[in-house]
Amino acid sequence: MMFARFQPHPFPRQYRLTKTDEFSSVFGFRRALRGKSFLLHYGESRPAGAPAAHARLGVVIGKKFLRHAVGRNCVKRIAREAFRLVQSQLPPRDLVLRLSVKMQKPKRQARLEIAAEIRQLLAKIQEKRP
Protein backbone atom coordinates (compact mmCIF):
# COMPACT_ATOMS: atom_id res chain seq x y z
CA MET A 1 0.00 0.00 0.00
CA MET A 2 1.44 3.36 -0.99
CA PHE A 3 1.03 6.46 1.14
CA ALA A 4 1.00 9.97 -0.25
CA ARG A 5 3.43 12.26 1.47
CA PHE A 6 1.53 14.92 3.38
CA GLN A 7 2.64 18.47 2.61
CA PRO A 8 0.49 21.04 4.39
CA HIS A 9 2.37 23.94 2.79
CA PRO A 10 3.95 22.85 -0.49
CA PHE A 11 6.63 24.77 -2.35
CA PRO A 12 5.31 24.61 -5.94
CA ARG A 13 7.65 24.35 -8.89
CA GLN A 14 6.52 27.74 -10.22
CA TYR A 15 8.23 29.44 -7.24
CA ARG A 16 11.57 27.65 -7.74
CA LEU A 17 14.55 28.23 -9.95
CA THR A 18 15.17 24.85 -11.54
CA LYS A 19 17.31 25.32 -14.64
CA THR A 20 21.00 26.10 -14.85
CA ASP A 21 20.28 29.07 -17.13
CA GLU A 22 17.99 30.61 -14.51
CA PHE A 23 20.69 30.35 -11.85
CA SER A 24 23.33 31.69 -14.28
CA SER A 25 21.25 34.73 -15.15
CA VAL A 26 20.90 35.65 -11.46
CA PHE A 27 24.63 35.16 -10.80
CA GLY A 28 25.44 37.09 -13.98
CA PHE A 29 23.52 40.13 -12.76
CA ARG A 30 26.09 40.39 -9.92
CA ARG A 31 23.81 41.87 -7.29
CA ALA A 32 23.89 40.35 -3.82
CA LEU A 33 23.10 41.06 -0.20
CA ARG A 34 25.50 39.67 2.37
CA GLY A 35 24.52 38.17 5.68
CA LYS A 36 26.67 36.49 8.33
CA SER A 37 26.51 33.07 6.65
CA PHE A 38 24.66 33.63 3.38
CA LEU A 39 24.68 35.64 0.17
CA LEU A 40 21.32 36.44 -1.39
CA HIS A 41 21.82 37.05 -5.10
CA TYR A 42 19.00 38.74 -6.96
CA GLY A 43 18.23 39.43 -10.59
CA GLU A 44 16.44 42.27 -12.31
CA SER A 45 12.79 42.83 -11.61
CA ARG A 46 10.47 41.37 -14.17
CA PRO A 47 7.61 43.50 -15.53
CA ALA A 48 4.18 42.83 -14.09
CA GLY A 49 2.94 41.25 -17.34
CA ALA A 50 5.82 38.76 -17.54
CA PRO A 51 4.94 35.05 -17.41
CA ALA A 52 6.29 34.68 -13.86
CA ALA A 53 5.04 37.78 -12.03
CA HIS A 54 6.16 36.53 -8.64
CA ALA A 55 9.42 35.94 -6.80
CA ARG A 56 11.24 32.64 -7.36
CA LEU A 57 13.93 31.06 -5.17
CA GLY A 58 16.93 28.87 -5.82
CA VAL A 59 19.12 27.53 -3.01
CA VAL A 60 22.80 26.60 -3.39
CA ILE A 61 24.47 24.79 -0.49
CA GLY A 62 27.87 23.49 -1.55
CA LYS A 63 29.45 20.37 -0.10
CA LYS A 64 32.53 22.49 0.51
CA PHE A 65 30.63 24.53 3.13
CA LEU A 66 28.36 21.91 4.68
CA ARG A 67 29.73 18.40 4.40
CA HIS A 68 26.72 16.23 5.33
CA ALA A 69 23.72 15.88 3.04
CA VAL A 70 21.39 15.87 6.04
CA GLY A 71 22.65 19.32 7.03
CA ARG A 72 22.44 20.69 3.47
CA ASN A 73 18.87 19.45 3.15
CA CYS A 74 17.97 20.95 6.52
CA VAL A 75 19.26 24.38 5.50
CA LYS A 76 17.37 24.13 2.20
CA ARG A 77 14.12 23.32 4.02
CA ILE A 78 14.63 26.27 6.36
CA ALA A 79 15.30 28.59 3.40
CA ARG A 80 12.27 27.41 1.43
CA GLU A 81 9.98 27.83 4.43
CA ALA A 82 11.28 31.34 5.19
CA PHE A 83 10.76 32.26 1.52
CA ARG A 84 7.28 30.73 1.41
CA LEU A 85 6.14 32.83 4.36
CA VAL A 86 7.09 36.17 2.73
CA GLN A 87 6.85 35.25 -0.96
CA SER A 88 3.67 37.27 -1.54
CA GLN A 89 5.35 40.49 -0.29
CA LEU A 90 8.50 40.11 -2.40
CA PRO A 91 9.01 41.93 -5.70
CA PRO A 92 8.92 39.72 -8.83
CA ARG A 93 12.60 38.78 -8.90
CA ASP A 94 14.65 35.65 -9.16
CA LEU A 95 16.60 35.03 -5.95
CA VAL A 96 19.43 32.63 -5.20
CA LEU A 97 20.40 31.97 -1.60
CA ARG A 98 23.96 30.69 -1.28
CA LEU A 99 25.82 29.50 1.81
CA SER A 100 29.12 31.38 2.01
CA VAL A 101 30.82 30.07 5.18
CA LYS A 102 31.65 26.60 6.49
CA MET A 103 29.28 25.27 9.10
CA GLN A 104 28.52 22.07 10.92
CA LYS A 105 25.25 20.17 10.75
CA PRO A 106 22.86 22.69 12.35
CA LYS A 107 21.52 21.96 15.83
CA ARG A 108 18.24 23.45 17.08
CA GLN A 109 19.68 26.83 18.12
CA ALA A 110 21.67 27.12 14.91
CA ARG A 111 18.51 26.40 12.90
CA LEU A 112 16.74 29.31 14.58
CA GLU A 113 19.70 31.59 13.81
CA ILE A 114 19.77 30.41 10.18
CA ALA A 115 16.05 31.09 9.79
CA ALA A 116 16.41 34.54 11.35
CA GLU A 117 19.29 35.46 9.03
CA ILE A 118 17.39 34.32 5.95
CA ARG A 119 14.33 36.32 7.03
CA GLN A 120 16.53 39.42 7.45
CA LEU A 121 17.96 39.03 3.94
CA LEU A 122 14.49 38.58 2.45
CA ALA A 123 13.28 41.66 4.34
CA LYS A 124 16.11 43.66 2.72
CA ILE A 125 14.92 42.48 -0.70
CA GLN A 126 11.41 43.68 0.17
CA GLU A 127 12.87 47.17 0.78
CA LYS A 128 14.58 47.10 -2.64
CA ARG A 129 11.31 47.23 -4.58
CA PRO A 130 11.71 48.64 -8.11
Image (cartoon, helix red, strand yellow):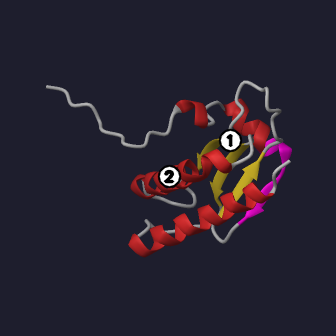
Mark 1–mark 2 Cα distance, whole angstroms, equals 14 Å
Please check the rendered image and state whether residue 123 is part of the magenta-colored stretch, yes or no: no
> Range of the magenta residues?
27-34
Residue 61 seen? no
The circle drawn on residue 55 is 1
The circle drawn on residue 94 is none
Q: Nearer the viewer, residue 127 or 41?
A: 127
Q: Nearer the viewer, residue 85 or 34?
A: 85
Q: Position of residue 12 (x, y in %)?
A: 51, 34
Amino acid type assigned to the residue bearing label 2 in the image: Glu
The N terminus - image quarter:
top left
Residue at screen point 61% across, 62% down: 119
Residue 43 seen? yes
Mark 2, residue position:
81
Q: Position of residue 16 (x, y in %)?
A: 59, 37
Residue at screen point 67% across, 49% down: 89
Q: Secondary structure at mark 2?
A: helix
Check the image and report above or below for 95 versus 104: above
